[in-house]
Image (tube, rainbow, N blue to C red):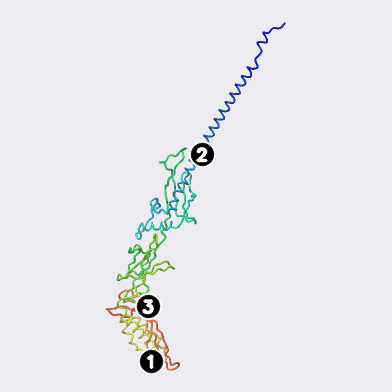
């Protein structure tokens, strides 16, 4: 015999199972949608964050500041460079600050510039060179953190810390001048503090001793100039005189003047002496003919009279002096003048050609004024 009680206790309706399964499936799908949506939202937000982070990171890189500074060079902004130099150029008393402005402008003129990170640059202390396109270094600058600016994500802002412009005061002036002359560089008179050596005695003094002394030479040197200087001089009388630039030695030379009020008078005396001297040597003038040209007791005159070259001339006819010329004149002082005098003796010979023999004399004579009268102090042979 069977009963229905046991069957009712163990039997589940298939429809109920289907309903429970459908609910779980719906839950699972919803959960997946939510998770997927969250992931998508998270990825979107992360991508947006990453993009903004990268943008801020790139904007915070120091090279942007370096570019801005370098652009000042490309804009030829002389005022910016002068105002931002950490160390101002040292200008000598012979120039003013305007010369530095002109120098910086000349360096920038017609050039374009780029920046290059230096070998000593660090992440926390960026450092850069400014160079021309052809590689010439003109400046160096350092950056530091700009604490007045707050950037997102803790990034640093940068600003200029120092700027060094490579100013090259490359010009100088080496000057040689007589000690009795005044020399000026850019209008500023030089003095003994500008001299590089002690006074150099003149080698010409030996020809006028013991009657006079010739001024020595002073050498000056001026360094640290930003442009080629203007060198001028005045002679011992205060008159402007010539200052020659020797490009080979890179030296300015102030020579003694070559003209003075009594030059015509002295030239006449010099030609008269040289003519008499030539005639004395050729035995066409007496031994006493030269006495009036020399001071009493002159060693130079004594040497001439002892010179045996007079004996070299053979017998000849009359002589005349022609083609007189003053080839050089140097005025050392009011009382000492050097002259190079040229004359020609035209000498008639007793045999040979009917044309006279031409005997040139080129005399190098130092004249001294003694008691208001010009005399021969010495002769350079």
Name the residue nearer the viewer: 316 or 290: 316
3D distance between C-alphas at marks 1 and 3: 29 Å
For label 3, the residue is 328
Are the residues tagged 1 and 3 within 8 Å (C-beta)? no
Q: Residue furthest top?
A: 1
For label 1, the residue is 318
Q: Is residue 207 above or below residue 189?
A: below
Q: Is residue 105 above or below residue 61?
A: below
Name the residue nearer the viewer: 89 or 205: 89
Instruction: State the mark number for residue 24.
Output: none
For label 2, the residue is 51
Residue 206 image offset from top left, x and y in percent: 36, 75
Label 3: state its secondary structure: strand
Residue 63 image offset from top left, x and y in percent: 47, 46
Q: Earlier in the sequence, mark 2 or mark 3?
A: 2
3D distance between C-alphas at marks 2 and 3: 88 Å
Are the residues tagged 2 and 1 within 8 Å (C-beta)? no
């Amino acid at each position: 015999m069977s009963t229905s009680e046991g069957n009712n206790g163990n039997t589940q309706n298939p429809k109920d199972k289907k309903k429970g399964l459908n609910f779980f499936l719906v839950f699972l799908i919803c959960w997946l949608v939510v998770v997927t949506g969250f992931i998508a939202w998270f990825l979107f937000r992360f991508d947006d964050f990453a993009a903004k982070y990268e943008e801020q990171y790139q904007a915070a890189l120091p090279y942007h500041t370096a570019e801005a500074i370098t652009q000042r060079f490309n804009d030829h902004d002389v005022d910016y460079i002068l105002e931002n130099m950490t160390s101002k150029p040292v200008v000598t008393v012979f120039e003013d600050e305007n010369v530095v402005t002109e120098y910086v402008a000349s360096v920038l003129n017609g050039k374009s510039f780029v920046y290059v990170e230096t070998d000593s640059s660090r992440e926390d202390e960026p450092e850069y060179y400014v160079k021309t396109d052809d590689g010439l270094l003109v400046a160096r600058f350092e950056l530091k953190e700009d604490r007045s600016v707050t950037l997102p994500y803790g990034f640093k802002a940068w600003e200029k810390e120092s700027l060094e412009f490579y100013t090259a005061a490359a010009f100088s002036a080496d000057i040689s001048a007589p000690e009795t002359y005044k020399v000026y560089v850019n209008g500023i008179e030089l003095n003994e503090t500008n001299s590089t050596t002690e006074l150099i005695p003149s080698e010409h003094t030996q020809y006028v001793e013991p009657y006079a002394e010739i001024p020595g030479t002073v050498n000056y040197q001026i360094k640290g100039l930003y442009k080629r200087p203007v060198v001028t001089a005045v002679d011992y009388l205060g008159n402007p005189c010539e200052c020659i630039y020797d490009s080979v030695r890179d030296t300015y030379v102030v020579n003694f003047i070559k003209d003075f009020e009594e030059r015509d008078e002295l030239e006449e005396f010099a030609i008269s002496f040289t003519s008499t001297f030539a005639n004395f040597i050729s035995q066409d003038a007496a031994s006493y003919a030269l006495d009036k040209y020399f001071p009493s007791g002159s060693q130079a005159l004594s040497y001439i009279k002892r010179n045996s070259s007079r004996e070299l001339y053979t017998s000849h006819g009359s002589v005349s002096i022609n083609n007189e010329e003053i080839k050089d004149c140097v005025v050392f002082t009011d009382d000492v003048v050097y002259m190079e005098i040229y004359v020609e003796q035209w000498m008639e010979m007793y045999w040979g050609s009917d044309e006279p023999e031409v005997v040139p004399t080129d005399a190098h004579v130092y004249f001294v004024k003694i008691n208001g009268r010009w005399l021969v102090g010495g002769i350079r042979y």
